[in-house]
Image: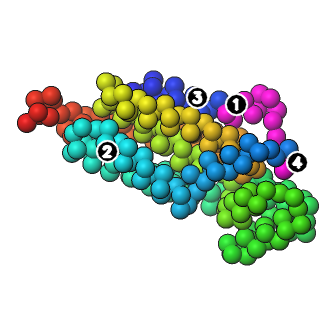
Amino acid sequence: MLKRLSLYTLLLCLVPFFAWLTNWQWQGDEDYTTFDTFFYFLTETGSLPYAIITCGVLALAYFFCIKDKKQAFAVIGIMALSVSVTQGVKSALKTVFAEPRPFIVQLAEKSSVSPEYFYHQPRNEREKIVLDYYADKQVDAHLVHHRSKETGYSFPSGHSIFAATWLMLAVGFGQLLGRNNKGMKYLTAGIAVWAVLMLVSRLRLGMHYPIDLLVSVSLAWVFHCGLFDWIKNKPIFNRTLQDRLQ
């Protein structure tokens, strides 16, 4: 279990590591491409309210993949707990570190609005500042909309920990219940691709720095190593074949 969770964690960590190794830095929207519009739609699967739909779709998929419905309900409950806890930790850390997003730093450099002033404003005022800043700029409307809604702090990345959490859940339950379950294997593969692209999208869209992604993925790994160590011996997840037939 630990090795498999660590392997997939390393997969996600390749995104920030690659950014550092290539000395990649977000340069603004001058090199924005059509493909980045795809990243916008993908990143929205981790933004409210669409993240709730993502959770519902994935939970439903696991419900149908797991034949034992008592186990399925237990899995969905653990998933809900996991997403809630990791998002709560993320929110607490954002408040503590209060790091501005890359696009906010750029906004401050090219306008009279400082990051300190920006973050002292209520969310509706921050949204207005972002919309006013981009009003006369040739920036994709989808991206402007996304940034106007994502005016919180940068560190750590909520989208990244959301994606990493779902990947850790897929890997963990795949090892615990689905070693011979093709549906769960396909889900794990699909979620892995989605999670990697989610991390890439956060860098490409100017929403986060590589360190934000790395810490988010690491937090998800630590939490789920403990979570699966705790639940692996629970009776509901160790029912014998005879129990399932009864």
Q: Which residues are magenta?
A: 15-30
Q: Looking at the image, is mark 3 or mark 1 earlier in the sequence?
A: 3
> Which three-letter amino acid code belongs to the residue tagged 2?
Phe
Asked if labels 2 and 4 touch by Cβ distance under 8 angstroms, the answer is no
The residue carrying pointer 1 sits among few (fewer than 14), some (14 to 19) or many (20 or more) residues within 10 Å by Cα, namely some
Please state which of residues 165 and 57 is positioned toward the viewer in this rendering. Answer: 57
Residue 119 shown in magenta:
no
Q: At numbered mark 1, what does the secondary structure look like: helix, strand or loop? A: helix
Q: Position of residue 20 (x, y in %)?
A: 76, 32
Q: Secondary structure at mark 4?
A: loop
Which is more toward the observer, 85 or 174? 174
Q: Are marks 4 and 1 in contact (CB under 8 Å)?
A: no
Q: Which mark is residue 17?
A: 1
Residue 55 x, y percent position in the rendering: 45, 52
What residue is disc 4 on?
30
First along the sequence among labels 2 and 3: 3
Whichever of callouts 4 and 2 sits on the residue coming sooner in the sequence is 4
Name the spot of residue 126 as percent of width and height, x first.
73, 71
Quadrant of the image for the C terminus?
A: top left
Is there any visible trace of residue 82 in the rendered image? Answer: no
- The reply to whether dot 4 and dot 3 touch (C-beta < 8 Å) is no
Mark 2 neighbour density, 10 Å: few (under 14) some (14–19) many (20 or more): some
